[in-house]
C-alpha cells in the first residue's frame, strides 16, 4: 500500500506499564548529543568495566530470561571469553542511547557503524527535517499578513535563500553527528567502522568493502540497524525529480509543483515545508482519507487547517502505479489507478514527486541465517523484551533487536527507549517497555501529537474487554497564552475510562503540541489516573493549561481507586 502509515495506525501487542526514563530527549537523543555530559557519567569512567551487579547474578538473571533457548538450537559453540560485554550493530539514536546506558551500567561496550554516526534520524530524518520546518514556520508567520497585523506588526515581503536554508539543515546534522561521536568516545565506547554481520552465537564480524574483516565477540549483541525509505514497485527514483525524504532534506531545488505520495506524518511535514517556500502540492493517498493513522477527529481538524487553506490538492483512494522522472523537457508523469479495482484512474504531470510511503527495515546482510533467524517482511522478530526469536519460535540467547529493524514502533525515541530497556535486562533488572506510553509528533504548523489509543482503537478495546470510555475535549481558543500569540486554532482530546480513570489516549492539534504531549505520555507510563493528575498545578498563563483544563473536564466515578495502574496494557 502506498499510503504513508503512521506508527500508531496498527495494533500493538500487550505490554506492561514501564517506568519513564528521564534520559530521553528530543528524537530520542540524550543531552550528550548536544555537547553536554552528566557528572555521574564522568564518575563512571574510571570503573566502566565493573558491572553494577555481580557477574554471577547478572548472568543468572539472563539465563532465566533465555530459558526457552539453548546454544545448541543455533548451531555453533559460543566463545568462552569475550572482547566486550555488549556490541551494538548500528549507531543511530537507538544504538547511541543503548551504548550510553550500557556505560552507565558498567558494561564494556562497542558500537559498529557502517555509514555515518547518528543514523537516519540525525542525518536523513528528524534532525535536518526540523531545521527545514523551523524555516517554514517562520516563513509562514511572516507571510501571514492578517496574523502580523493583529499583533500590530508591519512586515515587508518575506523571502528566502534556498542554499542558506539547505546549509542550515546540513550544518545542524553535522553538529549533532559530531557531538554523538564525541560523547561515545569520551565515555569509553569503542567505535568500530564497517558493516556488521553476525557470524555465529555472540560473534560479529565487521569491515568495509574490499578490506579484510575483523571479528569480535560479545556476551550480548543488540541489532540497531534502523530503516530506509520504502519505494513501491513501479516508481523510478532518480534522486532529482523523483525523490525520497533522503533527497528532499538536501533541498537542492524547490519545485513549482510537487506531488507527495503518502499523507502520513512524513508527507505532511514536507507539505508544510514546500508550501511555505512557494510550491504547490498534490497529495496522492491510497486510503479514502488523508492522514491515516491519526485520530479521525484530529485529522479532520488538521485537514481544515493544514490542507484546505493552502495550495494543496489531493487524490485519495488511488495508487501511483507508475512514476516516470522528468527528462528531455517532459515533466514527471504519475499514473494513478483505483486502490480497490486497480482500474486506471488518472494521470498527473508535475515538476517533481516525493515518495513518502513509509520506511522499510534495513536488515539485509546481518547474517541472520547464521543463527537460524528469518525476518518477517524484513523485520527481525522479537518478543516484548526485544529478544530475537528464531525460525523455530525459540529465543536466540544473548541477541536483541531494537528500533525500526524490529517494527514495533518506528520512531527514533522508541528505539532509544528499547535500547535502554535491553540494557536494564542485561544488568539484572527485568524491564518491559510500555509502547502505549511512547508519544509521536508531526511538526507541522500547528503541530500534531499523540500518545496511546485513537478513539476507534479505544472503542474497539472497550467493546472487546467490556468497559466504557469517555471523551474530554478542550479548545486552544480557551487558552490565554495561545490567544496572546494569536494562535487559538487547536484542540486537545482525552480518551479515558470513567470507571477507574485510566488514560487510554491523548491527542493534541495546536501550537507546541509536540511539547505538550509529554505530560500525558508520562502519566500513562507511570500509571497515573485522571482523578489524580487533575490536581497537578500548571503555571499561568501557559499552553500547559490546555492539558490542565482537559484533565479537569474528565468525569470519573467518585468511588474509583486512586492506586496507580499496574495491570498489563493491551491494544
Image (cartoon, rainbow, N blue to C red):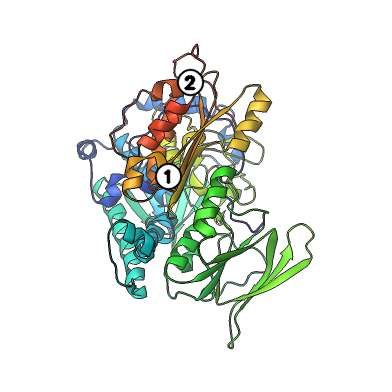
Q: Determine the residue located farthest toward the top in the rendered image.
A: 559
The Cα atoms of the two marked residues, 2 and 1, are separated by 24 Å
- Give the camera-side residue of 391 and 229: 229
Which quarter shows the N terminus? Answer: bottom right
| Label 2 close to label 1 by CB (< 8 Å) | no
Q: Secondary structure at mark 1?
A: helix
Q: Which residue in the structure is indicated by mark 2?
A: 565
Residue at image x 38%, y 47%? Answer: 512
Q: Is residue 488 above or below residue 172?
A: above
Q: Which residue in the structure is indicated by mark 1?
A: 413
Q: Is residue 104 visible?
A: yes
- Give the camera-side residue of 268 and 380: 268
State the image quarter where residue 235 is shown: bottom right
Measured from the top left, where is residue 94 in percent x and y? 42, 46
The tag on residue 140 is: none
Measured from the top left, where is residue 231 in percent x and y? 60, 63
Residue at image x 53%, y 43%? Answer: 409
Q: Is residue 46 above or below residue 159?
A: above
Q: Is residue 59 visible?
A: no
Q: Determine the residue located farthest toward the bottom in the rendered image.
A: 328
State the image quarter where residue 108 is shown: top left
Q: Total of numbered circles in the picture?
A: 2
Q: Is residue 160 above or below residue 467?
A: below
Amino acid at each position: 500500500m502506498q499510503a504513508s502509515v503512521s506508527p500508531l495506525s496498527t495494533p500493538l501487542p500487550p505490554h506492561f506499564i514501564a517506568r519513564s526514563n528521564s534520559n530521553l530527549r528530543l528524537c530520542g537523543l540524550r543531552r550528550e548529543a548536544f555537547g553536554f555530559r552528566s557528572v555521574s557519567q564522568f564518575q563512571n569512567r574510571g570503573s566502566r568495566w565493573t558491572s553494577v551487579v555481580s557477574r554471577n547474578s547478572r548472568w543468572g538473571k539472563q539465563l532465566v530470561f533465555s530459558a526457552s533457548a539453548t546454544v545448541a538450537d543455533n548451531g555453533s559453540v559460543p566463545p568462552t571469553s569475550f572482547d566486550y560485554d555488549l556490541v551494538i550493530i548500528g549507531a543511530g539514536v537507538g544504538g547511541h542511547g543503548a551504548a550510553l546506558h550500557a556505560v552507565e551500567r558498567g558494561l564494556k561496550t562497542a558500537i559498529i557503524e557502517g555509514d555515518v554516526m547518528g543514523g537516519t534520524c540525525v542525518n536523513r530524518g528528524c534532525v535536518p527535517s526540523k531545521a527545514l520546518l523551523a524555516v517554514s514556520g517562520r516563513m509562514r508567520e511572516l507571510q501571514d499578513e492578517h496574523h502580523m497585523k493583529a499583533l500590530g506588526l508591519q512586515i515587508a515581503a518575506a523571502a528566502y535563500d534556498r542554499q542558506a536554508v539547505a546549509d542550515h539543515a546540513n550544518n545542524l546534522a553535522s553538529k549533532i553527528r559530531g557531538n554523538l561521536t564525541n560523547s561515545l568516545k569520551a565515555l569509553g565506547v569503542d567505535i568500530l567502522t564497517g558493516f556488521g554481520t553476525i557470524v555465529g552465537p555472540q560473534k560479529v564480524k565487521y569491515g568495509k568493502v574490499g578490506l579484510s574483516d575483523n571479528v569480535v565477540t560479545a556476551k550480548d549483541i543488540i541489532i540497531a540497524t534502523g530503516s530506509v525509505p520504502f519505494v513501491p514497485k513501479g516508481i523510478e527514483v532518480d534522486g532529482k525529480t523523483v525523490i525520497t525524504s533522503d533527497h528532499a532534506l538536501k533541498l537542492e531545488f524547490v519545485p513549482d509543483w510537487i506531488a507527495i505520495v503518502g499523507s502520513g506524518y512524513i508527507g505532511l511535514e514536507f507539505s508544510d515545508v514546500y508550501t511555505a517556500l512557494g510550491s504547490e502540492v498534490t497529495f496522492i493517498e491510497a486510503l479514502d482519507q488523508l492522514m491515516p493513522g491519526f485520530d479521525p477527529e484530529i485529522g479532520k481538524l488538521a485537514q481544515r487547517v493544514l490542507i484546505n487553506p493552502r495550495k494543496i490538492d489531493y487524490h485519495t483512494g488511488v495508487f501511483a502505479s507508475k512514476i516516470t522522472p522528468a527528462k528531455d523537457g517532459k515533466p514527471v508523469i504519475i499514473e494513478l489507478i483505483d486502490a480497490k479495482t486497480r482500474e486506471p484512474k488518472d494521470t498527473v504531470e508535475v515538476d517533481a514527486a516525493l515518495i513518502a510511503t513509509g520506511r522499510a527495515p534495513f536488515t539485509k546482510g546481518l547474517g541472520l541465517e547464521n543463527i537460524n533467524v528469518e525476518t518477517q517482511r524484513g523485520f527481525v522478530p522479537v518478543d516484548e523484551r526485544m529478544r530475537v526469536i528464531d525460525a523455530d519460535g525459540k529465543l536466540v540467547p544473548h541477541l536483541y533487536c531494537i528500533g525500526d529493524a524490529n517494527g514495533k514502533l518506528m520512531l527514533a525515541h522508541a528505539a532509544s527507549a528499547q535500547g535502554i530497556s535491553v540494557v536494564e535486562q542485561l544488568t539484572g533488572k527485568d524491564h518491559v517497555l510500555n509502547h502505549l506510553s511512547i508519544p509521536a509528533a508531526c511538526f507541522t504548523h500547528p503541530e500534531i501529537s499523540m500518545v496511546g489509543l485513537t478513539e476507534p482503537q479505544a472503542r474497539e478495546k472497550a467493546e472487546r474487554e467490556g468497559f466504557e470510555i469517555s471523551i474530554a475535549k478542550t479548545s486552544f481558543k480557551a487558552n490565554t497564552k495561545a490567544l496572546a500569540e494569536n494562535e487559538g486554532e487547536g484542540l486537545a482530546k482525552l480518551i479515558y475510562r470513567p470507571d477507574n480513570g485510566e488514560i487510554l489516549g491523548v491527542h493534541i492539534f495546536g501550537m507546541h503540541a509536540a511539547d505538550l504531549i509529554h505530560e500525558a505520555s508520562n502519566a500513562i507510563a507511570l500509571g497515573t489516573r485522571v482523578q489524580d493528575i487533575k490536581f497537578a498545578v500548571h503555571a499561568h498563563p501557559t499552553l500547559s493549561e490546555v492539558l490542565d483544563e482537559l484533565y479537569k473536564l474528565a468525569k470519573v466515578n467518585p468511588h474509583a481507586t486512586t492506586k496507580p495502574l499496574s495491570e498489563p496494557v493491551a491494544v
